[in-house]
Image (cartoon, helix red, strand yellow):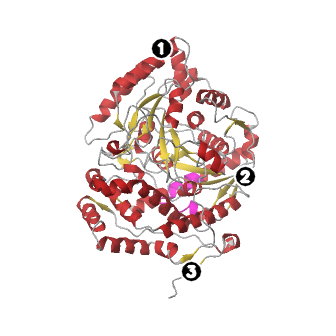
Amino acid sequence: MGKKKVMLPAREVDLATVKYQYDKIEAPHLTGFSLKLFVKLLEAPGIGSLIISRLKKENKMVEMLRNTVIPEPPMFKPEFPPQESETGVVPLDEDGKPEERVALALKCLPDYDPSTNWSADSSASFRYWKIRDYAHAYRSKLTTPSIVAERFISAMDEFNNKKPPTPLLISYDPEHIRKQAAASTKRFEEGNPLSILDGIFMAIKDDIDCCPHPSNGGTTFFHEIRQVEKDAVSVSRLRCCGVILVGKANMHELGLGTTGNNPNYGTARNPHDPERYTGGSSSGPAAIVASGLCSAALGTDGGGSVRIPSSLCGIVGLKSTYGRTDMTGAICDSGTVEIIGPITSNVEDAILVYAAILGSSASEKIALKPSVPCLPDLSSRENSNALGSLRLGKYTEWFNDVFSTDISNKCEDVLNRLLDTYGCKTVEIVIPELHEMVTAHIVSIGSESLCGLTPDFEDGKRVEFTHDTRTNLALFRSFTASDYVAAQCLRRRIMHYHMEIFKEVDVIVTPTTGMTAPIIPPAALKSGETNLQVSANLMRFVTTANLLGFPAISVPVGYDKQGLPIGLQIIGRPWCEASILRLAAVVEELCGTPNKKPLQFYDMLKGN
């Protein structure tokens, strides 16, 4: 008796009474033998359910899901009210040709003369080459895609021979790369490149189909149970633009982790400090872009998996609105929190790749009724006016809940510079029930992942999963149907709070992660690791956009005292990618120098 709680309807909650909760995750940090033993206990009849039950009670999951009356009806996937039109934007035809969208996106970019950077002093401050730099070099016959391909293959050979293994690609065919590069080189020789993306090297995360490679999702066996017969829709759109697809990038197994740890193939290392994680689950895509080996990569983002590694590796990661990109051909194509998004070294490259891959599936067009996709017109004089009217929402207590004040201070400095330079006002907001939102997200992504994996788990594949995946699956198996419905009731409730907030602000700003890149424990390389406190620090700010389906972007804003990258996250209203891209471009400009060259960096364009 006395356990039952009844929540007020969301519309009746008094925001003045809301207090921020500083949560500490109650769970052991385990690697090596202790992790293996823990997994055996979790999977043992009787004792396993007792351990899971204890962990859930200590983290207040049972109280929230089983003992609380939630008055809102469930929302089984994001539902968005109509949104105000964005200003200073260029609409795109999502049913048109990808190369035509990319051509229009190119016209939206500010003036830029690649020739000045090509001839610039190599000792000048570090900067990544843009896609426009590659296009200029190809068109001016300063280099060719085939020459760049040979540099790429040589660099990959070097990576593949490292001890311990640090593979960026886990499916890779040099001859296939040479064939694509030769075709692109021929198009340039004939004066007929397909688009600005022709000859641009891109990696594809291992849970997105890309022929002729298998999709293993970071496992050792998924190719046995799921055959790849054609490209994912997003990949086929890139191929139409002439992109050179270099292979399948490493990842945290099945996306069920935030560090990028993968004992199956070796763990990708952070280019800024090889003793630290890249973040995950899109670890390989982020590392290969941050290392300069590729201009861009595709990742999936169901719980920050594009934005977390982008932040930790000092690059840009874009999560579009749920349903904006067609998920057909991804392993995680049936969930309600995932998207496919670009990881790039700069914002304008994210705009170009996003323009190529966007376009909702037929079913999502019916269910979600997406607004017309738009890009910010960064070439227009009206761009500054559109910026000045943006209102930035900041929940200060949440914003400052970080592992190191280096993070919050650096992000706060950016907000001050936005105000001073462009007049962007910061508005204090309050977001209720953030702890409940985290619970709802875990139950949603966990139950949806488990639904797809259970047949193989029960069919004898259990022992082939990594130990940290098995730890997560043990938790997910404890969720009931009523837990899942309760999580969807929370989703509707939390959506209400955010839609009310978006009546007062245009975007919500936070640090991308609550900590910079964590150190890789040596024991974790062989047997994996479970560290839910680190996961909580890395995911603190990102799950909002996944559970509620909002667009969000991580853009680098500087470094902590250890020289590790820090990212600022911008969360937008539904379907308002143009607004967050516009603001991200300005943040990048304000924070553009000095840039720190990663310890592991390869100049693919000049070969230096």
Residue 489: x and y in percent read: 59, 67
Q: Taking 453 as reference, is 204 above or below it?
A: above
Disc 3 residue type?
Lys
Region of the chain picked out in magenta, as a range: 398-411
Which is the main secondary structure of the residues drawn in magenta?
helix
In the image, which disc is placed on residue 82?
2
**Quadrant location of residue 80?**
bottom right
What number of labels is visible? Answer: 3
CA gap, disc 1 and disc 2: 47 Å
How far from the left and from the top, in percent, is residue 190? 53, 11
Q: Which is more N-terminal, label 2 or label 1? A: 2
Q: Is residue 401 magenta?
A: yes
Give me the residue at 28% from left, 52% from top: 464
Work out whether residue 80 or residue 459 is closer to the camera in this orientation and state it: 459
Q: Which residue is mark 3?
A: 5
Crowd rating for badge 2 (residues with CA inside 10 Å; few <14, some 14–19, many 20+): few
Mark nearer the N terminus (2 vs 3)? 3
In this view, the residue in front, 177 or 370, is 370
Image quarter for residue 214? top left
Q: Which mark is residue 186?
A: 1
Q: CA distance from mark 2 to mark 3?
A: 33 Å
Q: Residue at x 64, y 56 (%)?
A: 79
